[in-house]
Image: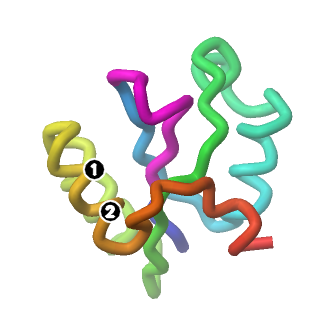
Amino acid sequence: MATFISFPTLSEMYSISSVTSDLIKRIWDHKTGNGSVFMSKYNVKYLMYFEEHPNIETAIQREKQIKNWRREWKLNLIKQQNPSLKDLWDEIT
């Protein structure tokens, strides 16, 4: 299981935190516009951060925690592991 954070661009004021059992498929869906209506509408396609979890329960718990954070806190978390703020797609494929 993975918890991940995606952004349309870093200049946008919203981000997406979610849980998936297949990170590659989920991000590919975002990139190709085949994900949810929300993802397509807002062009959310950049994987900025992800965490691996041993089970769905811990992944969901972490997702809920991150969703309640301010944008600044999310960006600080991302910058700890991804200081150049690049799309991590190439690293997971």
| Picture coordinates of residue 26, whole percent (x, y) | 71, 51
| Residue found 85% across the figure and 34% down from its top | 32
Task: Give the alpha-carbon distance from disc 2 to disc 1, as whole Å.
Answer: 6 Å
Q: Is residue 50 left or right of residue 77?
A: right
Q: Is residue 18 magenta?
A: no
For residue 79, the mark is 2
Q: Nearer the viewer, residue 78 or 61?
A: 78
Q: Are marks 2 and 1 in contact (CB under 8 Å)?
A: yes
Q: Amino acid at mark 1?
A: Leu
Q: Residue 78 occupies which quadrant of the picture?
A: bottom left
Quadrant placement of the C terminus = bottom right
For residue 75, the mark is 1
Q: Nearer the viewer, residue 60 or 83?
A: 83
| Picture coordinates of residue 59, whole percent (x, y) | 39, 68
Q: What is the number of callouts on the image?
A: 2
Quadrant placement of the N terminus = bottom right
